[in-house]
Image: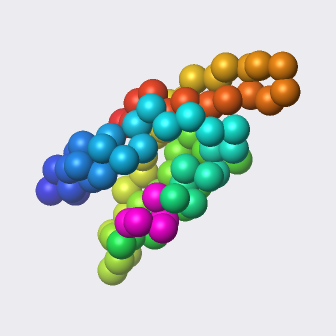
């Protein structure tokens, strides 16, 4: 059951609103997710490659965020290319 919830969350929320987002700070994507999601989303590790989604009542699941890096002259840009 939780795998189906996770799959729907990825397909209907993350992929629709955030896949292919380009940012210079990965946590900005997480901040925006929290702004429009009814659920709490928190980074699990420092490089924001895993986030935890809290559905309430101790129901949580983790999402693995796959980023590509594109360093340019002033800063590195990160693109969210996949979520699993």
Q: Percent position (x, y) of residue 69?
A: 64, 23
* Colour convention: rainbow
Quadrant that contains the C terminus: top left
Can see residue 62? yes
Look at the picture and state if 75 lies above or below 55.
Answer: above
* Residue 4 belongs to the span the image colors magenta: no
Can see residue 47? no
Q: Which residues are magenta?
A: 33-37
Quarter of the image for residue 30 reads bottom right
**Considering depth in this image, is 39 or 4 the residue closer to the camera?**
39
- In the shown orientation, is residue 50 left or right of residue 55? right
Q: Percent position (x, y) of residue 42?
A: 55, 61
- In the shown orientation, is residue 29 left or right of residue 73? left
- In the shown orientation, is residue 60 left or right of residue 69? left
Q: Percent position (x, y) of residue 4?
A: 17, 50
Look at the picture and state if 4 lies above or below 80.
Answer: below
Magenta stretch: dominant secondary structure: helix
Look at the picture and state if 31 lies above or below 48.
Answer: below
**Considering depth in this image, is 78 or 3 the residue closer to the camera?**
78
Quadrant that contains the N terminus: bottom left
Residue at left 48%, top 67%? 35
Look at the picture and state if 30 lies above or below 74.
Answer: below
Identify the residue at the far right of this view.
74
Q: Percent position (x, y) of residue 81?
A: 45, 28
Looking at the rendered structure, the number of numbered marks drawn on it comes to 0
Residue at left 63%, top 44%? 26
Residue at left 36%, top 47%? 17
- In the shown orientation, is residue 35 left or right of residue 71? left
């Amino acid at each position: 059951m939780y795998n189906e919830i996770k799959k729907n969350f990825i397909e209907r929320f993350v992929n629709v609103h955030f896949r292919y987002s380009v940012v210079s700070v990965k946590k900005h994507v997480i901040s925006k997710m929290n702004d429009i999601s009814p659920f709490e989303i928190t980074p699990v590790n420092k490089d924001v490659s895993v986030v935890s989604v809290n559905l309430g009542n101790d129901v949580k699941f983790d999402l693995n965020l796959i980023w590509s890096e594109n360093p340019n002259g002033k800063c590195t840009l990160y693109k969210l290319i996949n979520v699993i």
